[in-house]
Image: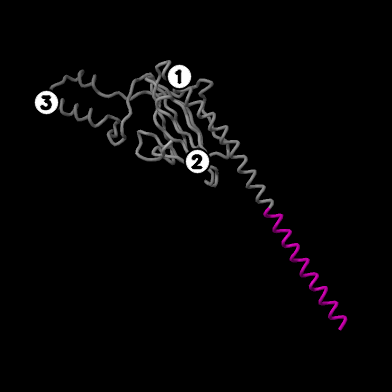
Amino acid sequence: MNFFSSTKKKLKSAAGFTLFELLVTLAVVALVVGLVVSQTNDLFDRDIKQASSKLAATIRYLYNKSATEGIYFRLILDIDERAYWIEATGDPYLLANPQAFAASGKSTASKSLLDEAKSKSLLQDEEIERIKPKTPSFDQVSERLLKPSKLPTSVYIKDVYVEHLQGPVDSGKASIAFFPNGYVEYAVINFRDEDDSLAYSLKTNPVSGSVKIEDRYRTLDDEE
């Protein structure tokens, strides 16, 4: 009787110890996971603040430089490569809804005018050539302050909204235009972390060139 009683107590003790070990192990795992998540969030928070501040400063600089030097700029955002760079041209141009452009890059209005003129023989060849809309020639800017930049490893571009496009661009490249008359396109650049659980956004002010940074996802339709 004493033997079985002693054995039973030992088994209970062993079972209790095993359960205790399991609870301790689970607690340690939870602590480690919590620390990893916290460190990951802290890394993203640090990186996104640095990256968004740098990009916002670039946008403000381009706005001022375009207005003071009479240069047309466009900010190219490569969503897949998590990078951006600047292109410039001295050729005047206007933006329009993409649906108003034919594959050749000419506006449908200008194309219709040319077709009508040709059919009626109202214009000579040199006159037709003169009214053709010209495609601006952009070159990448190599200025030290505007060199191509890569986002930190923890920061991704989720999508980009630009006023001349009908919806968000979430892959490939998107561009934001700057004009010498003191205007930058109304745009929103949304950032995310690797798991797409954290969000950050930059929103341009077309008239002042200022940039609003917020820790949330935004669209062009969102109220200030």
Quadrant including the N terminus? bottom right
Q: Mark 1 or 3 closer to N-term?
A: 1
- What is the residue that sits farthest to the left in this orientation? 120
- What is the residue that sits farthest to the front in this orientation? 224
Q: How is the image coloured?
A: one colour
**Badge 2 density bin: few <14, some 14–19, many ≥20, Cα 10 Å:** few
Prevailing secondary structure of the magenta residues: helix
Residue receiving disc 1: 65
Is 3 left or right of 59, judged from the image as shown?
right
Instruction: State the residue in front, 32 or 92.
Output: 32
| Residue 216: mark in rendering | 2
Q: Residue at x 60, y 36 (%)?
A: 46
Q: Secondary structure at mark 2?
A: loop
- Which residue type does callout 1 highlight? Lys
Q: Secondary structure at mark 3?
A: helix
- Which residue type does callout 2 highlight? Arg
Residue receiving disc 3: 120
Q: Mark 2 or 3 closer to N-term?
A: 3
**Contact, CB < 8 Å: mark 2 with mark 3?**
no
**Contact, CB < 8 Å: mark 1 with mark 3?**
no
Q: Secondary structure at mark 1?
A: helix
Extent of the magenta region: 1-30
| Residue 209: mark in rendering | none
Residue 193 vertical position relative to residue 74 in the rendered view, above or below: below
Image coords of residue 160 (percent x, y): 43, 37
Is 58 left or right of 28, judged from the image as shown?
left
Residue 198 vertical position relative to residue 7 in the rendered view, above or below: above
Image coords of residue 115 (percent x, y): 18, 29
